[in-house]
Image (cartoon, rainbow, N blue to C red):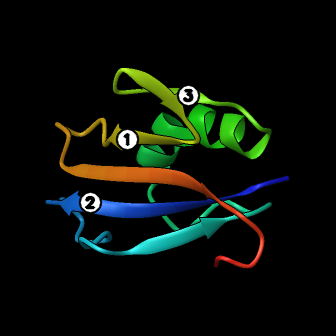
Amino acid sequence: MAKVVLTIVESKCRGGYLKKGDQFVVGDLCPPICHELWNQIYPSVYALQNGAMLDYGIGRAKCFEGVCPDEGRVKIHGEVVEDGEK
């Protein structure tokens, strides 16, 4: 199973949990982020972990952009990392 790195691109997190630049490597466990954001991005993370290419701009790539369902207060970027990168 591939690993996915999640990077907080922008944050106005109401609870102050996530800061711009925070990174989490997702292997087989959920990262320590709020469940609302995790529920929003989990389908994309799961797809990437299992080899999918996702729509990204006008093409397809092994990455995605996501936003918090709480008025888009947090923006996140996820991408596959190859073995040895993280």
Residue that protrudes farthest toward the front in the picture: 59
Pointer 2 and pointer 1: residues touching (CB < 8 Å)? Answer: yes
x 49%, y 51%: residue: 78
Q: Measure the alpha-carbon separation of dots 2 and 3.
A: 19 Å
Residue beneath disc 3: 54
Q: Could you tell me the amino acid type at mark 3?
A: Leu
Question: Looking at the picture, how far across and down is residue 72, in whole percent?
Answer: 20, 40
Give the residue drawn at x 23%, y 71%: 16
Q: How crowded is mark 1: few (under 14 residues within 10 Å), some or many (20 or more)?
A: some
Q: Which amino acid does label 2 sit on?
A: Val
**Image check: 76 left or right of 73?**
right
- 25 or 74: nearer the eye? 25
**Left or right: 34 in relation to 14:** right
Q: Vertically, is 75 above or below 28? A: above
According to the picture, the residue beneath numbered tag 1 turns out to be 65
Q: Residues within 10 Å of mark 2 (few under 14, many from 20)?
A: some
Left or right: where 58 falls relative to 33:
left
User: Which residue lies under the disc numbered 2?
Assistant: 9
Q: In which quarter of the image is residue 69?
A: top left
Count residues near mark 3 (Cα–Cα under 10 Å), then give few for <14, some for 14-19, many for 20+.
Answer: some
- Residue 82 % position (x, y): 71, 64
Q: How many numbered circles are shown?
A: 3
**Label 2 to label 1: alpha-carbon separation:** 9 Å
| SS label for mark 2 | strand
Q: Which residue is drawn at 37% across and 40% down?
A: 66
Instruction: Mark yes or no: residue 5 visible.
Output: yes
